[in-house]
Image (cartoon, helix red, strand yellow):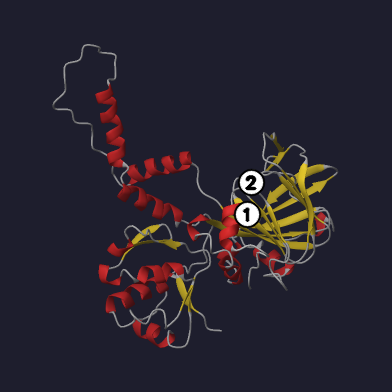
Amino acid sequence: MQLELNDLTPEQFLAEYWQKKPLVIRQGFKNFQDLLSADEMAGLACDELVESRRVFKKNEQWGAEFGPFESYEHLGEKDWTLIVQALNNWLPAAEDLIQCFDFIPRWRLDDVMVSFATPGGSVGPHIDLYDVFICQGSGSRRWRVGDLGDHSEFAAHPALLHCEPFEPILDIELNTGDILYLPPGYPHDGISLNSSMSFSVGYRTASASDMLSGIADYLIDNELGKAQIADPHRSISTQSGCVTPADFARIKQQLLDTLDDKLISQFSGCRLTSSKCELDLPEEELGFQTSDFLEAIQNQDLIRLGGLRCLYFESDYREGRLFINGAAESLSSDLAEAIPVLCDNPVLTAENLAEWVENSAFLEQIVAWINKGYWYFDED
């Protein structure tokens, strides 16, 4: 699978469109084929571990319900949509789609969402707070996109937040292989013209309030930030109700000293690698041995589990620090250069691991991660 941005380079796209304005990319994927069939998607939506929902409209009333689902016959043959979140957690082929957009770092990735819609199917006009590449699979959909502005929102259903009618700045039909890029805040409405599938690659960040709330929990859970303000050289107060500039500086400095680079990177690394949806992990650790790894890596690729998040900070990875699945991990500093290889490459080969496969500490760690299900060997 290869992404074509038409006359744009990735650098031009980021400079001219990313978080600035929508873009229609005609035939961004030539000869695009659905990553899974509608029946396979319905099978995923039967699983209680998979996040799915249905949105439908009947007698001009919107409805929505959450999976797992067992049947669809009662919905009829039009005006409904099935959605599965975090497809990349369950379908290895979704990784190929994500890689096409890797000019955007993975820490910004939310998930790959797949939508199957019958004729007339839609989720209604709404506004998203994340960037999304809507990749049209089989069939076609009409998309109307409005401009940024003060758009009123309302609950069309307890599970559906819609926006009021808007004047479109784009009114287009997406066909197989076409892509619609939308930055946050643009109202949009897509209606399926026939039975169709689309695959949305979404990118989001947390709000500052969410991050600060999370840091507060992190400090409490790890018993950090307990240092109190010390002022042994305090001057006499002549205004007992006043916070002087010197005292304000002490209060501010207490917070700044607590939220230092080390704590923020540690918290952020754990938070950014936590999966919002279930991962397809084994219930018990596997029984892989070092000898099994050394034999398998010679002729099989090592694949990162779909949806597994791992990252490192350029500022300190040389100390051996990385983050995997919501936890801080560490390697010895002499293995630090393996960290970018592990985190930057969804597929590991004998060639890119050659420098470390004779190191017993590295072997012990990679086998431990394999036994947790974080990586697995491609046996195809």
For the point 13% across and 26% down, the residue is 233
For the point 50% across and 60% down, the residue is 106
- Residue where numbered disc 1 is placed: 132
**Horizontal and vertical percent for residue 147?**
70, 42
Whether residue 161 sits left or right of residue 375 in the image: it is right
Secondary-structure class at tag 1: strand
The amino acid type found where label 2 is placed reads Asp
Whether residue 378 sits left or right of residue 129 in the image: it is left
Quarter of the view holding residue 224: top left
Q: Residues within 10 Å of mark 2 (few under 14, many from 20)?
A: some
Secondary-structure class at tag 2: loop
**Horizontal and vertical percent for residue 54?**
72, 53
**Horizontal and vertical percent for residue 133?**
64, 57
- Residue where numbered disc 2 is placed: 128
Whether residue 160 sits left or right of residue 265 in the image: it is right
- The vertical placement of 307 against 79, above or below, is below
Q: Are marks 2 and 1 in contact (CB under 8 Å)?
A: yes
Q: Residue furthest left?
A: 233
The amino acid type found where label 1 is placed reads Val
